[in-house]
Image (cartoon, coloured by chain):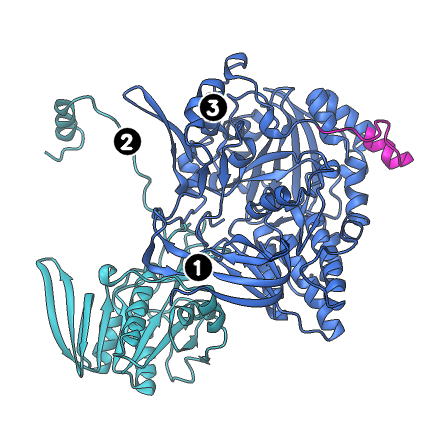
Chain colours: A cyan, B blue
Amino acid sequence: MKIVVPIKRVVDPNVKIRVKPDGSGVDLASVKMAMNPFDEIALEEAVRLKEAGKADEVVAVSIGPQQAQETLRAALAIGADRAILVRCEGRIEPLTVAKLLRIIAEREAPDLVLAGKQAIDDDSNQTGQMLAGLLGWPQATFASAIVVDGSNVEVTREVDQGLMTLSLTLPAVITADLRLNEPRYASLPSIMKAKKKPLEELSPEELGIDVAPRLEVLEVSEPAARKAVRMVSSVDELLLKLKEEARVL
Amino acid sequence: MTERESMPVDVVVVGAGPSGLSTAIRLKQMGDAAGTDLSIVVLEKAAEIGGHIVSGAVLDPAALDSLIPDWRQRGAPVTIRVSSDAFSYLTAKRRFPIPGIVLPKALHNDGNYIISLGDLCRWLAEQAEAMGIDVYPGIAASDLLYGEDGAVIGVATGDMGVDRNGQPKPSFAPGMDLLARYTVISEGAHGALAKRLIARFALAADSAPQKYGIGIKEIWEIDPARHRLGHVEHTLGWPLTEDTNGGGFIYHGADNTVQIGFVVHLNYSNPHLSPFGEMQRYKTHPSIRALLEGGKRVGYSARAMTSGGWQSIPRLAFPGGVLAGCSAGFMNLPRIKGIHNAMWSGIKSAEAIFAALQAGRGGDTVANLAEMVVDGPIADDLKPVRNAKPLLSRFGTLVGMGLIGLDLWCNQLFKLSPFGTLRLDKPDHATLRPARDAKPIHYPKPDGKLTFDRLSSVYLANISHDEDQPVHLRLRDPNVPVSRNLPLYDEPAQRYCPAGVYEIVRTEGEARLQINAANCVHCKTCDIKDPSQNIDWVLPEGGSGPNY
C-alpha cells in the first residue's frame, strides 16, 4: 500500500503571530515556521502503518515556497520515504491545493491520502474534503483511529454525539484529528539520513493548474484584547455582576 | 530503534552563534583550499538557528569582513548603518548627553551596523550549509564524552521524549554520540558544557573570575515620527544607584522598531534588586517614555553576557577541544560589543584547529591556541579597555566612567594605562549583602502599556517547552533555597530571574521554592548569581526554550 501525506508549512504553533501594521496579512519575516501539527499526526500514522507492515511507501507532498523543503526534510526524518515539493509563492487557496493534490494522486496512484484535518494558519478544513470530491474517492474526516484491513479501512471519527466508525474501500482520503496519535521526535541519525532521501521539485505549470487566488483578502486584524480579570468576593456578588453587568443571567 | 548510534566526524561545534558558525565556516574554507574534505557538524539547542540569540545588536563588521569578504554581495542581513550616536548619563528626571568629542575613539560607532544577530546567524548557517557543513538545530549537546586518557572525544546529544521521571515516552527518540577529533564549545556566556570543562581542566586557574551582566531587551514598534533609522543611544546612571553597574541601550532598527534594553551587572550587592524591575523602570524615564508613547511592545528576551574582559579570559584549549566566543568571554564592556570578538575567536580557533588536523592530530590540546586566538585583533580590542570593569566596580558609575575615559584616552594617545592592570575581585555569586542590611527597592506596578509583569513578557519570548520532561534547573541540595537563601537573602532567584521561573510559594505558613522550568529563557543568570551556587542549569530537551 502506498500512502500520500500532504504537508503544509505554517507558523510554529508556539510563536505568537502578529498582524502587519497595514492589515494586509500576518507578518512572516524572521518568524519560526514548522510542520502543520495535524499533518504531523497524519504523517506519524502513515509511518506507523508502514512500520506495522500495512504500507510499503510513504510519500510526503508539500505545496509552498522553496523553504517548504525544510519542512519536507523534517517529514523525511520522521519516516517518509520520499518527498515532492510543488513550488508556489503567495497565498494558495484550499481548492487550488486540492486540485494540485489530485494531479499528484493521479500520478502516484496511492491507496490512501492521509491528510491533517486542517491547517492551523487559515483553519479552512476544506482540502481533504475537496480532494476526495475531485477524485471521487470515499472520505473519512476527523479520524481518531485507523485500522487497515486489506482493501478496507475502518476509521473512528470524533463527532458531537460520540464516536462514529466508518468502513471505507480503498483508495480513500482520511483526515487526521488531534487524538489519532502522539507524533515522535525525529532522532539525529534519522535527520542525517533524511538529507539523502529523494526530494522532487515540480511547478504548478507542469501540473497544469492555475494557482491564482479566487478570493480577495480585504483585511486581517487582531482580535480585540481581553478585558482585565476582576476578582469578586462572594457568589452573590458574582451573580449580581452576571445579571447587571454581563447581562447573561 | 532505541539504541544509541555514534558517528565519527572531524570537528563538532556546540552552538550555532556567531563564534561557532565562524569556526565551522573558516575550517571548511581552509579545508576546501587545501583539498581536504572535513566533516563538520554544528549542533544548536534552539528549535531553529537564531532562536536563542538575543538579537538587538550593534555590529563592528571587521571579523565578518575577514570571514566572508563579499558579504554585501551575498545579501547578509547587515544593512542598517549607524547614522547617529548618543551617549548620556541619566538622573531620575533628566538626561545629560556626553559630547562625542570627549569620548575616546573606541566608544564611537562610525562604520558599525544595527543588526538582528538572530538573522545574521540564520544567514551564516545558510552559508555554512551551502559549503557542506551539517548544521542541526533542535539538537542539544547535553553531555561531554571522554576517552580513556581523560580527553574530550566528542559530545552526546540528548534523548528526546523522556518524561518528568526520566522514563521514555511513546515519542522517545534516543540521542547520538558524535565522536570528534576536536570539539568546539561555543555555547555563549556560561554554557552548560563550558562550565564543566572549565572546572574539570581548571581552565580558569590563572585568570580572574568571569564577571557577568544580565541583559533584558524588548522590541517596540514606535510612532514613525519619532523613529530615527540607524540611531544608537547608550545611557548610564538612573535607574541604577551609583554602586550598581549597568546601563541601557536604544537602537533604532528596521520597520519603525526600536530595540530597547537594560543591562545590570551581576556583581550587584542588594538582594532586593530585580534586573527585570530596573528594565521596566528604565522605560519610565521622561526621555524614553516620550519615545515609546503610543508604541507597541512586540518582543522580549533576556540573556547573561560576560563582562570580565581581558583579565577573565580562561585557558582556551583543553585536551580534545577549545572554548570559543563567550564560552570563554570576549565581550568588550565599554564598547558594549562582543560579536566581532566572538567571530574573531571562531576564525582564529579554526585556523589553529586546522593546523592540528593537517598534522594528523586529534584528541589533544591544540598548540599555540591562546597566542593564535587572543593575540591580534582580540588583544587590540580588549587590552586597552581591561580596566573598565574593575574601575566601575570600585568607584561606582560616575567616578568610574570618568576614570575609564581617562584610561582610554591614555591608551589611545600614549598606548599605556595609568592604572596598569587592575584586578577583578570576587565572583558574582559572592557579592550579595544579607537582605536585612540592604535597602528594600519598591518597583512600580506595571501599567500594561509601557511597563509589564514577567509573565506577559515571557509570553512574547514564544517559549516551547514540553513540561513532561525532567526539570533542567537542578538543585544540588533541595533544602538550600528555604533553609539558607530565603532567610539570608530573601531568595533572590525570585527577582534576578527575568522569566519568573523561581517562586517562593507558601502553603499553610510553610515556604517552598517552586521552579517553573517551562518559563526558562535559557539566560543562565540563576546558575551564575545563586549565592549558594546550588542551581545547576543543565540542557533541557533539544528545541526547548524561546523562539526569538
In-front residue for pair A143/A117: A143
Q: Residue at x 58, y 63 (%)?
A: B179
Q: Residues within 10 Å of mark 2 (few under 14, many from 20)?
A: few
Residue B258 lies in quadrant? top right
Q: Is residue B88 shown left or right of residue A31?
A: right
Q: Measure the C-alpha gap from mark 2 to mark 1.
A: 32 Å
Q: Quadrant of the N terminus of chain B?
A: bottom left
Residue corresponding to mark 1? A33
Residue B247 lies in quadrant? top right
Residue bounds of the magenta highlight:
B407-424
Helix, strand or loop status at disc 1: strand
**What percent of the width, then of the height, locates residue A114?**
27, 73
Say if residue B229 shows up in the picture: no
Residue corresponding to mark 3? B485
Q: Are marks 2 and 1 in contact (CB under 8 Å)?
A: no
Instruction: Pinpoint the chain carrying mark 2.
Output: A
* Mark number, residue A229: 2
Q: Is residue B412 magenta?
A: yes
Instruction: Pinpoint the chain carrying mark 1.
Output: A
Q: Residues within 10 Å of mark 3 (few under 14, many from 20)?
A: many
Instruction: Pinpoint the chain carrying mark 3.
Output: B
